[in-house]
Image (cartoon, helix red, strand yellow):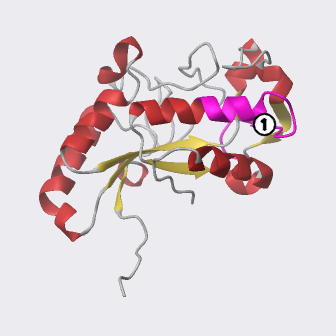
């Protein structure tokens, strides 16, 4: 009988906190491919704050400016991930990781960016806007980036679909979804959205 193991790989938080950059990710991917892949290590995961240009340590900046598109979907900060320029997102970095025979993952927080709610961005493939689905009393105790999403509101499903469609278009294989214990009904939406796609996602 083949034994199952937990996903094995490298996570940027462990050494770099919120401040990892693309060149560091690439170098660690190269090391893993050369020295660890044959033993089952396969995931390269970019942890929290990849969408914050000013991230610099494992300390969070309260109410930081974040990079996002017109639909309230977070995007990689180009000053830290240069290959994300011109709307490419994590696509080029994921492609490089895949070229090494590895898989690419990202960290996300539950919910919708507060910045999107304050700007009341439109939700992709919906006539709803961010303020209509936000659950503003559902917040993370240690990070100010996000509001929760009310899964009963029209537009909530479309928002979740839109972010996972974006991640799939980048070639993301693995999702580390954080602060999810505070929103169990949201977790069910995340699970449902990812099951519609062929990628393998993981939730801590």
Q: Is residue 161 magenta?
A: yes
Q: Is residue 4 left or right of residue 186?
A: left
Residue 61: image location, x then y, percent: 58, 32
Observer-nearest of 178 and 165: 165
Disc tally is: 1
Quadrant showing the N terminus: bottom left
For the question of whether residue 61 can be seen, the reply is no
> Residue 74 lies in what quarter of the image?
top right
Most extreme residue toward the bottom is 1
Residue stretch in magenta: 141-162
Whole-percent x, y for residue 109 in the image: 62, 42
Residue at point 40% right, 64% down?
7
Q: Quadrant of residue 92?
A: top left
Point out residue 86 in the picture as x, y percentages from the top left corner.
37, 11
Q: Let me know if residue 168 appears in the view.
A: yes
Q: Is residue 165 left or right of residue 159?
A: left
Q: Residue at the spot x=30%, y=22% of the render?
A: 83
Disc 1 packing (10 Å; few <14; some 14–19; many ≥20): many
In the picture of the structure, the residue carrying the numbered disc 1 is 149
Give the position of the C terminus as an image quadrant: bottom right
Which of 162 and 81 lies nearest the eye of the viewer? 162
Does 125 sit left or right of 166 as displayed?
right
* Residue for point 74% across, 19% down: 126
Q: Is residue 132 above or below residue 17?
A: above
Query: Relative to 34, is 169 above or below?
Result: above
């Amino acid at each position: 009988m083949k034994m199952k193991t937990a996903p094995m790989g490298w996570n940027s938080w462990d050494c770099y906190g919120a401040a990892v950059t693309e060149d560091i990710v690439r170098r660690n991917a190269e090391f893993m491919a050369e020295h660890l892949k044959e033993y089952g290590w396969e995931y390269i995961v970019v942890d929290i704050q990849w969408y914050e240009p000013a991230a610099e340590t494992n300390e969070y900046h309260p109410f930081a400016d974040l990079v996002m598109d017109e639909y309230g979907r977070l995007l990689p900060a180009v000053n830290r991930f240069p290959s994300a320029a011109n709307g490419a997102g994590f696509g080029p970095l994921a492609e490089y990781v895949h070229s090494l025979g590895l898989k690419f993952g990202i960290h996300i927080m539950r919910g919708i960016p507060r910045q999107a709610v304050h700007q009341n961005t439109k939700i992709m493939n919906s006539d709803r806007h961010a303020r209509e689905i936000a659950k503003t009393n559902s917040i993370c105790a240690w990070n100010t980036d996000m509001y929760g999403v009310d899964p009963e509101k029209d537009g909530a499903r479309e928002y979740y679909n839109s972010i996972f469609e974006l991640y799939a278009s980048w070639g993301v294989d693995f999702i580390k979804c954080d602060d999810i214990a505070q929103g169990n009904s949201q977790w069910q939406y995340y699970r449902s959205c990812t099951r519609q796609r062929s990628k393998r996602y993981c939730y801590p």
